[in-house]
Image: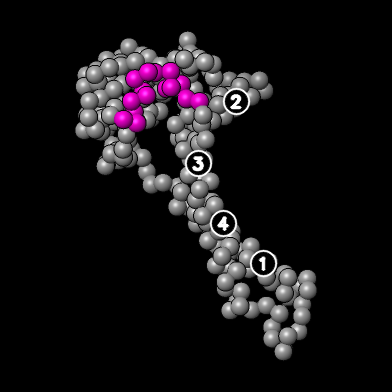
Amino acid sequence: MGTVQSTQSSRPRSNNPLTSISTDAAMLNQLARDVKASMSIYDAGEDQVYGLLAEFAHPGELLHAAEAIHEAGFRHFDTHSPFPIHGMDKAMGLGNSLVGWITLGGGITGLSLATLMQWWMGAVDYPINISGKPFFAIEPSIPIMFELTVLLASLATAAGMFALNGLPRPYNPLFYSKNFARVTDDAFFLHIAASDRKFDQETTAQMLQELGASNVETIHDHGEEDQD
């Protein structure tokens, strides 16, 4: 019978720890970029290019453009409008919000702390015999359990909303665009970040124009300097 020689043993293996460290660092950097991108915080690319900002005439065009951009494989992009647009989450490929799970975690934490606190104070730290009643019982503990559950759930909801939206954020490179000031009035914008793997300034700008953008502007990240 013939012998089968494994090709894995013949492949050169890198024993250089620096190579492994650089690979791990690149993976961590990419993970950090993706996490920040989920909060609409993007890193600038070459020549401080932050991305492309496209303006559309009405919400329907913005919705269609967002859907086309997502289908083209872009992931680091966001839309801006004076009011919520029905169906935009689906068009952008966004899943369900994580705020609900954060609220649940806060509520469970509050309930657990309230139960533990009352058990510890009544049955362990300072037990008092009152008419032979148990040192700890669920029934009289319900009000405190309810209050701490609601308190920590509401605080977790607010904190989770701010964190997932990358707030507070006093500085945003989009503020350098004078047209972007109209986003709270009557303008509709789509921003594609330069950190996206598929981003190419010329090709992406042409794609946005083909989608009906009335104006495509290159945004540069100059840092937190005077924007006037």
What whole-number distance in Å separates the C-alpha atoms at marks 3 and 1? 29 Å
Label 1 sits on residue: 116
21 on left or right of 210:
right
110 on left or right of 104:
right
Q: Residues within 10 Å of mark 3 (few under 14, many from 20)?
A: some
- Give the SS element for disc 3: helix
* Badge 3 or badge 1: first in the primary sequence: 1
Q: At 55% across and 67% down in the image, what residue appears?
A: 146
- Point out the stretch of residues depicted in magenta: 171-185
* Badge 1 or badge 4: first in the primary sequence: 1
Name the residue type under label 2. Ala
Q: Residue 162 shows which numbered tag? A: 3
Label 2 sits on residue: 25
* Badge 4 or badge 3: first in the primary sequence: 4
What whole-number distance in Å separates the C-alpha atoms at marks 3 and 2? 28 Å
Label 3 or label 2, whichever lies nearer to me, is 3
